[in-house]
Structures are given as C-alpha cells and as structure tokens.
Amino acid sequence: MTEIAGATSTYDMSAGNREDLWDIISNISPMERPFTQNISRIRAKATAHSWLTDSLAAASSNKQLEGDVTSFTTAVSQTKLTNTCQILKKAFVVTGTQEAVDKAGRRSEIKYQLEKAGNELLRDLEWTALSAQIGSAGSQTVARQMAGFEAWIPSTDNSGNGVRGGNADSSGSTAAYASPGGGAVADGTNTTLSSTGLLTALGLAWTDGGDPDTIMTNTFQRSRIKTFGNLATNQIQLNKSGEAAKLIDSVEVYISDYGKHKLVLNRFMRPETVACIQMDKWELAELRPMFTETLAKTGDGEARHIIWEGTLVCRNPDANAKISDCTTA
C-alpha cells in the first residue's frame, strides 16, 4: 500500500503539530531510609554533642554477715562519648524565565527543585550515618564531619564487637572509638560471610548486654544470609471464612541463639558490611533541623538552599555489632 497522492501527513506538518509531552515526571530514585527514618531525633546544643555511658558491675555472689560493718567501693566514673555535628546542604537557582514558562509535570520549577533537593539531602544523611566515615572537628577551611555507624563498632582485637567476613580474615580492622573522631576503618581482604561470623557478631553484642533487633545489609549479603536457613516463615492472616487474607508483615526475621532479628535491606550501606543494630541505642542529634532559605538575588533568578546540621548518636556502641570485609560477588 502507498500513501494517498497529495495527502498531508504529520511529516509535512511537523513544525505546526503540538508536542505530546506527558504531564508527569517519573522519578525512580528510592526514598526508603531504614536507618535514619527509624531512630529518634533529639536536640544538639553545640557543634560537639556529648553523652555518657555506664554499666553495672558484673553479677556475683552476694552474702553478708549478720550485723556486719558496711564497707564501700569507689564508684566507677561514666564514659563520655562525643560526635561532631556535620552540615549537609543542597542548593539550586532557577532563572525567572524558567519559572514563568509552561512546564510539563510541575507548575513551579522552584517548588519542584526544592522538593527534589530535600529528598537528595535526606538520602545523603542516610548514606553518611551508615558510612565508615570518621569524625572530625574541622577548621575554617575543612568541613566538620560526623562519625558514621561503621566507625563506632571497633574490631574484636580493639575491644569491640566487629567481626570480619567469615570470622577468619585478619587483614582489616576498625580502631577503638576515640571521641570525637571515631575509630578509623581499614578495609581488609574480603571473605565470604558465614553463619558463624554472623552468630559471633550477634553474640558479642548480647554478651555486652545488648539486644540487636535489626540486621541491616545490602542486597548481596541479605541473599547470603537467607541461605543460612534461620528465617522465620511469613504468617498469613485468615479471614472468618478460613480463607487466606492479605499478608500481615512481609519483613523477614532471622532467628539466632540470641533472639529474633529483622532482616532489613538498605540501599545506602556499603555492600561489604553487615550491621547488627539495637535501634533504640541510636539517635540523630539536630543542631539545626532541616530548613530552607531564600538567598539574595544576584541576577534574574531565584536561589534557594536546604541545610541540615547535626550528628549521629550511639548511646552505647557495645549494644551493636558489625561484620565487615564480606565478599560482594
């Protein structure tokens, strides 16, 4: 078949035909932040935020003579921990023309970019809080930075709850935490995550008095953990007629000798690290909760920035554990 002779087609009128641009913007970048979304937020009052940790004396035999004269033991001082507040910022400028023109998927370019920048900042916060970054007080020329999760959990040879890969590699380490810098993380040779390594890490935290309720990991290590065979079966709720209703909870639970632990997938973790977390021992201390400012005009445009300033608080590192240097492929 051929086109009708003399017919006017879309090819002839391309300059005058309207563009078919869908009035929706599709953004697949994930906003789940399983760590920072699920810990408390408190108020910081200085760029160096400090808190105290303490512990009870070990349980022992306690029996006294009738009428015995009381003797006293000097109290053990608490331990002070500190982390440094870090400033996170996202900035943008939109020209007056771009704000005025007819746009697809948004009426205001400023509002759209503001929402996008805010989401990006929150993702940066999740990444930073889980990172191996050590803390630094900074200077007038160097930005302050907080110590991330990995810097809080030293290796077993540094009196901590860190286990390496399959619990056999000795080439990596994390130094004992020192306020306010944290413990420097030195990556070693990766080894395959083993059930023994995971159980050892959970046991170290439990022995210290912790109760890690969450195992947080990237996709590869989660798949590896699922091969260990200790996952609880998802429960299906039955309706009155006895038929299966919707799934109550799709969260997988890993069962160990030390209890039940939610197995949580986190896109922002380093793939070679598995975090065993007691979630109520972590907080975000905010010196300046997230806010937006309109900046001075320097031309035909509107400038904005979004700022968050605060730090990660680990109420007691011994309640948590980690497995580092795990094979990622």
Image (cartoon, grey):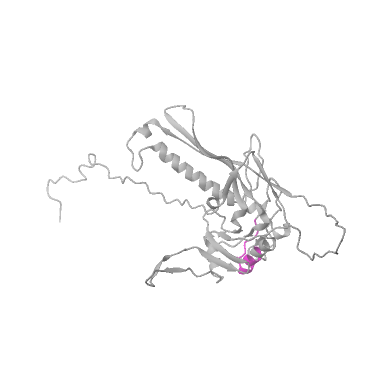
**Up-down: is 3 above or below 256?**
above
The residue nearer to you, when weighing 304 against 292, is 292
**Up-down: is 251 above or below 317?**
below
Q: How many marks?
A: 0
Q: Residue at x 73, y 49 (%)?
A: 79
Q: Is residue 31 left or right of residue 138?
A: left
Q: Is residue 292 left or right of residue 87?
A: left
Q: Is residue 80 visible?
A: yes
Residue 118 belongs to magenta span: no
Q: Which residues are magenta?
A: 187-201
Image coordinates for residue 8, horizontal then vertical, percent: 16, 44
Image coordinates for residue 203, horizontal then vertical, percent: 66, 65
Residue 193 belongs to magenta span: yes
Image coordinates for residue 208, horizontal then vertical, percent: 70, 60
Q: Residue at x 69, y 63 (%)?
A: 207
The residue nearer to you, when weighing 147 against 14, is 147
**Up-down: is 49 above or below 294?**
below
Residue 275 lies in what quarter of the image?
A: bottom right
Position of the C terminus, as image quadrant, is: bottom right
The residue nearer to you, when weighing 223 against 115, is 115
Q: Is residue 329 visible?
A: no
Image coordinates for residue 165, horizontal then vertical, percent: 63, 63
Q: Is residue 22 left or right of residue 153?
A: left
